Image (tube, grey):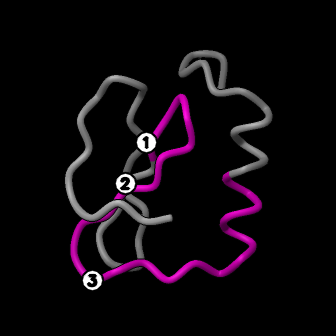
Amino acid sequence: MDERRISVAELLALLEWVNTGPVAPDGDWYKDFGSFMLCGTGPLPKTALERGMKPFGTPIT
């Protein structure tokens, strides 16, 4: 958390989003949480990008 400079509020937003049971699209996707973006393929999250890094795939809300 400290190394990636992710706030507690953003981690709570991630937890809240996960608890909603989100449905990810087929293929590559990303979800923006402010200081980081969670990226994945299909149902699996793959990596977190820091602010300023360019994601690929479909943005999800």
Question: Please, what is the three-letter code of the amino acid marked with disc 2?
Answer: Cys
- Categorize mark 3 by other alpha carbons within 10 Å: few (<14), some (14-19), many (20+): few
- Residue drawn at point x = 57 percent, y = 16 percent: 3
Q: Provide residue 33's location: percent of width, then percent of height.
A: 56, 43
Q: Secondary structure at mark 1?
A: strand
Disc 1 vs disc 2: Cβ atoms closer than 8 Å?
yes
Q: Which residues are magenta?
A: 14-37
**What label sits on residue 20 in the rendered view?**
none
- Residue drawn at point x = 54 percent, y = 28 percent: 35
Q: Provide residue 60's location: percent of width, then percent of height.
A: 42, 65
Q: Provide residue 17's location: percent of width, then percent of height.
A: 67, 64
- Residue drawn at point x = 46 percent, y = 55 percent: 31
Please give left or right for residue 17 compared with residue 41 in the image: right
User: According to the image, label 3 marks what residue?
Assistant: 26
Q: Secondary structure at mark 2?
A: strand
- Categorize mark 2 by other alpha carbons within 10 Å: few (<14), some (14-19), many (20+): many
Q: Provide residue 1's location: percent of width, then percent of height.
A: 65, 26
Question: Please, what is the three-letter code of the amino acid marked with disc 3?
Answer: Asp
Q: Earlier in the sequence, mark 1 or mark 2?
A: 2
| Vertical side of 44 occupied by 26: above or below | below
The answer for how far apart the CA atoms under marks 1 and 2 are is 6 Å
Of badges 3 and 1, nearer the viewer stands 3
**What label sits on residue 39 in the rendered view?**
2
Q: Earlier in the sequence, mark 2 or mark 3?
A: 3
User: According to the image, label 1 marks what residue?
Assistant: 48
| Vertical side of 58 occupied by 37: above or below | above
Q: Can you tell which quarter of the image residue 43 is in? A: bottom left
Magenta stretch: includes residue 17? yes
Question: Please, what is the three-letter code of the amino acid marked with disc 1?
Answer: Ala
